[in-house]
Amino acid sequence: MWKHVAANGMSFLIVALIAAAAALGWGQRQWVGDGPLEVAAFFEVEQGDTLARVSERLQAAGAIRSAVVFRVGVRTVERSGDLRFGNYEIPAGASMEEVLDIVTAGGPSSFRYRAIYVLRNSGTGQLRLSERLPGTGEVEEIARFAYEEGVPAEYAALVDAGTPMSYRLVIPEGLTSWQVVQGLMAADFLDGEVLDIPAEGMLAPTTIEVNRGEDRAGLLAEMQVSQERILAEAWENRAEGIPISSPEE
């Protein structure tokens, strides 16, 4: 009897080992094999995202086949804490291993949509919205508009959906402080009030990347600091004998 029980136990153990080996092999193939994406896709890791949330959203986006296998693989290679928030482009056919490398790389974000806002001397600005086509690197302009003309549906739909987008602010030379302030106030992607218009000549022209919701007064303060530095350098290197008594002149 005991021999029979032992034989059954040994058979069960062998079957279990075979099943475990098969499962391990299947998981390995899932981890390193080609992924399901037929075309490249953009993916955002939000600040504070957990491995569970990222894996579920990757599966929902069609970038991986199984959130469970992805989590097991990440934990197996001991990289659960390596996620870096940002926007990433995942190429077609990327394996789970490659997807992990992408969302843990950090560095500059890759956005599908970019908005460039150029201030004008009319006291407003023009926004150019473009799309970078996944997997090609080609850029197509979607819309170009001034806020006083109304916001086009293409831009409004992206904003309403909370679509990740990069913003570039261009403030050219020759604008008055009033024109700069009015242009910033017109921009829907900026936030905050401006209580005082800076003195004329105290705002440096600039081209900078900004985040949606960035504070207008903070941007003006940065421009003032830049202009003060420019004036200080010009004053330090001024030619002798010129009829100027202060950097502000």
Image (tube, grey):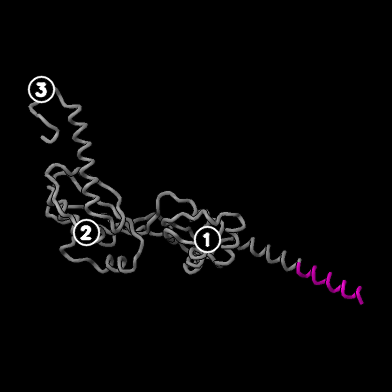
Residue designated by label 3: 241
Find disc 1 in the rendering and name its residue.
Answer: 93
Percent coordinates x, y for residue 108 in the rendering: 40, 50
Q: Identify the element where label 1 is drawn.
A: loop
Q: Nearer the viewer, residue 47 or 145?
A: 47
- Left/right placement of residue 122 relative to residue 190 reads left
Whether the magenta-drawn stretch holds residue 8 is answered as yes
Q: Answer yes or no: do the residues labelled 3 and 1 have beta carbons within 8 Å?
A: no
Image position, residue 201 (x, y; %): 13, 42
Q: Secondary structure at mark 3?
A: loop
Mark 2–mark 1 distance (CA, rounded to whole Å): 39 Å
Residue at image x 56%, y 54%?
79
Query: Is 70 displayed left or right of 240 in the figure?
Result: right
Q: Residue lying furthest top in this view?
A: 240
Range covered by the magenta-colored residues: 1-16
Q: Quadrant of the C terminus?
A: top left
Question: In front: mark 3 or mark 1?
Answer: 3
Q: Classify mark 1: residues with Cα within 10 Å, few (<14), some (14-19) or many (20+).
A: some
- Comes first in the chain, label 3 or label 1: 1
Amino acid type of the residue tagged 2 in the rendering: Ala
Query: Label 3, label 2: how many angstroms apart (C-alpha)?
Result: 44 Å
Q: Quadrant of residue 111?
A: bottom left
Q: Which mark is residue 187?
A: 2
Q: Residue at x 12, y 31 (%)?
A: 246
**Percent x, y of residue 197:** 13, 50
Query: Principal SS element in the magenta part?
Result: helix
